[in-house]
Amino acid sequence: MRKLRQYFSSIQMHMVVYFAVLVLISLVTFLVFSISYTQRSIVENSTEYTKQLIDHINQDIDSYINYMENISTVVINNQDVYNYLFVEDLDMANELVLQQRIKEQFATILSSRTDIYNIGIIATDAERYFINDGQEINYYSQKEKMKWYQETLRAGKSLTLSSSHVQDLIKDNYKWVVTLSSMLTNPNTKEKDGLFFIDLNYYDIDELCENISLGQKGYIYIVDSDGEIVYHPQQQLIISGIRNELIDEVLQKSEETFQVKYLEDTKIYTTSYSEKTGWTVVGVSYLSELMKNEEQIKITYLGITAILILIAFGLAFVFAKTITNPIKKLQMTMEKAQEGNLIPIEIKASESEIVSLNHSFNLMTGQITQLMEKNVEEQRQKRKSEMKALQAQIKPHFLYNTLDSIIWMIEVGETEESVEMTAALARFFRQSIGNSDEIVSIERELEYTKTYLEIQKMRYKDKMDFVIDVDQNIMEERIVKLVLQPLVENALYHGLKYKKGKGLIRLAGGYHEQGIVLTVTDNGVGMEEEALKHIFESREETAQNAGIGISNIQDRLQLYYGEGYGLSYESTVGEGTVVTVSILRGEQDIRSEEHTKSIMEAEEVLPETIQAGGKEV
Amino acid sequence: MKKKIYFIIVAVCICMMIVLLIGKMRYHSYQESRTLNMVLIPKLGEGSNDFWTSVIEGAKMGAKEYDVNLTVMAPNSELEYEYQNELIQNAIDMKPDVIILAPLHFENNTEAAKKIKENGIKLVLLDSYLNETIQDCFIGTDNYQAGVDMGIWMREYVKDDTQIAIVSHIKESSTAIERESGVREGLGVDEDRVVAVLYSNADYDVAYNEVRKLLEENPDIDLIGGLNLHSIIGSARAVRDMGLDEKVTIIGFDNVTEAIQLMTEGTIEGLVVQKPFNMGFLGIENAVKMESGKKVKTVVNSGIAMIDIDNIYTIENQKLLFPF
């Protein structure tokens, strides 16, 4: 679980996510735009197509009407018509001749065009008329109640085009027609006493409109200039109020395309107006039908988008990996560096950031390594200089006092003893200064301490004595220099000096579980518990105790052997003090390399010291 | 926390895409699956008479508008109720969503019609009822209300000494019963003036002879109400032939070109005309509504029009009276 979370919080995953979101947003935007564009272009194309269709219908109707107008002009200008209808005292023979001529003319017209249902001339009093091939008139015609006739009466001599209606002028013949008609003027009375009419078969228009396919549900309808429906597939439903159709809108917006919401769908209205007929042909198509194919397009788009997103995801994964891989390598190296393994790396990456990061990292590890080496060196130098300081601290007083003692001895005449003391002094200085090694053998350290004790014993004959009881086996073991002598000096000056009677200093040593243990025991005044607590605090600066600080010794021991080694004090007031020095055994082998190195370094420093020392001495 | 949010964003985006995709697909399939199958069994087929031709035309218009796959199966005569039962069985075998039936017989089509419902097919009755109410929806003329309207209209022609004859069609037919009681209701106090009820048995000649006989026996009758096409045409022919155009007023049901002619000639004063095209269209429309789970009235009135000499050729009525 946690590993999973870590995985999702990695740079790689972040990059994948960012990338994917980016791709997703751009793809979805693209999708929306392309779908809406497709939709718009589909609508535009279809309205364009519808427009062409209905324009074509209008042209067809215009050509019908044109033809009818031409026929009308021929008939209206035919003198026979007027003679037949209006000459009052026409004899039988002439009437028949005229009738025959009109019949022939009508026959020609009717045979030339099947779309013309009726053609006729009627005197208003209906005494004379001729219809088609001589059909009988309907004496019960209600033409006066019909709009087309009313309009013809109003228009007079000019031709009038009707809307669609039932023609009831002919007996037993009720046909749906569109009528082109005009009144005929009686040349004698100058009254409009006659009617000419020519009927266009309504079903030609019906068929014209019905045959045009505007999808499964789309349809065409025609409205005349008065807003009456000439043709509508659902005319009966509209009359009954079951359906509504746009009439006024269509008349106002002729030659335009507009959309209307209808139930859950949208109807697209395309209109075409004809100057000739005054009719407006309207094409209605349903958006949902146009969009049927668009559904497929949408699904295709969506499919492509989904695939593209998958691909983008995959690529994002790979890309992110190539970028994060060097970072990961760097991260791993850094983890190693944390553990102290400072190795430079070479990451193969083309990204300048990574290269520079790599460079910086290598530079940094290099500097750290350098610093660490420098630090080690400095530590060594510090120890060395501390040693020198110690050597320099061998107290001048001790020298002066010893020299005073020697003078005093010579004056008293204790020549032999003075010689011995002088020799011891010389030995002591040779031992202490003559060697700048940090590490010496225990034997040597003891020798030197012993010389110091001998000199002091000579000075304070009755005051002190000392015993050295060290296991001979440890003589070859090694120890940090100048440890025992300062401890002995402290024992002498802080332990025995204030004791009444003779004091004893005991130096012991031998192997122990953890290494080697050396003890300096005195039977002096001992220390208070309070003083014991503060024994390791640096005292170098206090003038009274200008000895070598316990803390100095402790520091050097622990620096060299590590925590857990060094000095420990036990003391009882009035009974004395025991200092235990615990060190590692076998140091001569482990540190042999460093040892030789330090010897070599020491040799460089040594001659000066010896020279300096030599001059002094 | 932040990482979680990013992860959620991506997950949501992907989910949205999937939902969109599925939604679009479902919408697509929904549209395709909505093509309903319906069978129309009228009383007569296309071209038989104006009424049923109009019904079928209307139904086809509805089928086109609502994208319905419509099959029409019709008997050849109004007497073939047994053949209509066969047609009903055939229709059931086609397993349509809806069967729209105009039963020829009040009783003898009921058993067959019950099977429609037993097969889990919705039943819409057109024009006529069955003796059991098993249909999901009825669409037709409200004959009682039409009768009331006609009765009120007839009262306009009632004079002090007016006697009324009602020429009905088939005694037991539901339409005859409903129309007659409607007319009586519409006549109100003048109902007492009804002196005779004749039955044409859906035959012009029977009506003609019955009316002629009645008028000869009872010359005081000056107002005739015809309750269907055969009754009114038979009556009008008889009145015309007897030269009683001026004296006798005829008002009746249904429309045919001859009725219009008789009206323009002055024999018939008024016609109550049904709207068969609307009937057919509403049949499909209500069936579709029913299938799409919308609430539908159990009885849908397809309406009537009252025609007299003055409004024959109005724009509204021309299409109704001369459908073809």
Image (cartoon, rainbow, N blue to C red):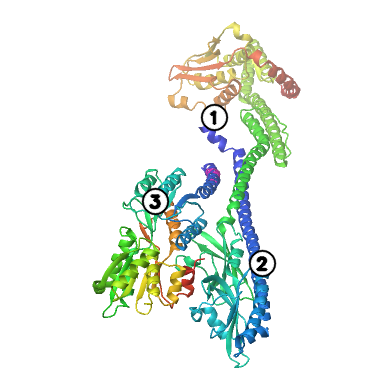
Say which residue label 2 marks: A56
Disc 1 from disc 3: Cα separation: 135 Å
Element on which disc 2 rests: helix
Question: Where is residue A477 shown, x and y percent of the image?
Answer: 62, 11
- The answer to whether marks 1 and 2 mark residues whose Cβ atoms lie closer than 8 Å is no
Element on which disc 3 rests: helix
Question: Where is residue B282 shown, x and y percent of the image?
Answer: 43, 59
Question: Where is residue B126 shown, x and y percent of the image?
Answer: 40, 57
Decide: is B62 above or below A328: below
Mark 1: give few (<14), some (14-19) or many (20+) Cα within 10 Å.
some
Q: Chain of mark 3?
A: B
Q: Nearer the viewer, mark 1 or mark 2?
A: 2
- Front position in the image: A557 or A295: A295
The answer to whether residue A424 of the structure is visible from this angle is no
Say which residue label 3 marks: B81
Magenta stretch: give its range: B8-14
Decide: is A462 above or below B278: above
* Residue B231 falls inside the magenta stretch: no
Say which residue label 1 marks: A539
Q: Chain of mark 2?
A: A
